[in-house]
Image (cartoon, rainbow, N blue to C red):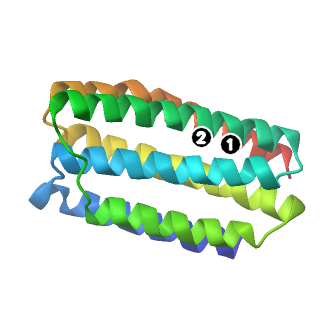
Amino acid sequence: MKIITLSTLTIVLGLASSTALAQAAAPNDAQIAGIVVAANTVDIDAGKLAEQKSGDEKVKQFARQMVTDHTGVNKQATALVEKLKVKPEESATSKSLRDAGASSMNKLKALKGRDFDKAYVDNEASYHQTVIDALDSTLIPSAKNSELKDLLVKVRPAFVAHLEHAKQIQASMK
């Protein structure tokens, strides 16, 4: 699993860097919106790939759920930032997420069969844990707008459920 671990490490380092800097320069609401959109887009893209490539029905169903749920979160976030007249802003964290997501996609595209399924599910478990940690340590505490903070708090349980679902699939693949 060295392939996915490197991508996950990039994501973790990007989010950890933002967490470490949070005390000195917490992300503003526009940057938080950009991070949310980037994180969801990365997972939507990976889910679409898994829907196409996986031969395992459990993995395909999980991938469909990721696409549906994360598309829904992005729609909610987009509607909120439009209402608040805030434009999602690029930050080192959102760029890191996009770059790591592109790297993961390239590596996943090269895999087939069970190797693909396992790498996709392992990546989903790591990714969701990383996003939950970022929500808890940086994004929710840094959000100044109460509606943005409420949205982050509202979607957190879905990320936790996704993590648990990914872990269940992981356990069944051993």
Q: Residue at x 52, y 37 (%)?
A: 70
**Helix, strand or loop status at disc 1:** helix
Q: Is residue 117 left or right of residue 48?
A: right
Q: Is residue 152 visible?
A: no
Local crowd at mark 2 within 10 Å, few (<14), some, or many (≥20)? many
How many angstroms separate mark 2 from mark 1 (CA)? 5 Å
Q: Which residue is mark 2?
A: 163
Name which quarter of the figure residue 166 lies in.
top right
Q: Is residue 58 left or right of residue 66?
A: right
Q: Is residue 119 left or right of residue 130?
A: right
Please tell me which residue lies in front, 43 or 142.
43
Tag 2 near tag 1, CB within 8 Å: yes
Instruction: Find residue 51 and report its horizontal and vertical position in percent.
Output: 75, 46
Considering every residue shown, the one lying at the far left of the view is 24
Amino acid beneath label 1: Ala
Query: Is 24 drawn above or below residue 130 in the view shown?
Result: below
Image position, residue 88 (x, y; %): 25, 48
Look at the picture and state if 114 lies above or below 73: below
The quadrant where residue 36 appears? top left
Of residues 4 and 28, the one nearer the viewer is 28
Q: Where is mark 1, residue-wise?
A: 166
Which three-letter amino acid code belongs to the residue tagged 2?
Leu
In the image, residue 146 above or below residue 64? above
State the residue at coordinates (51%, 29%).
158
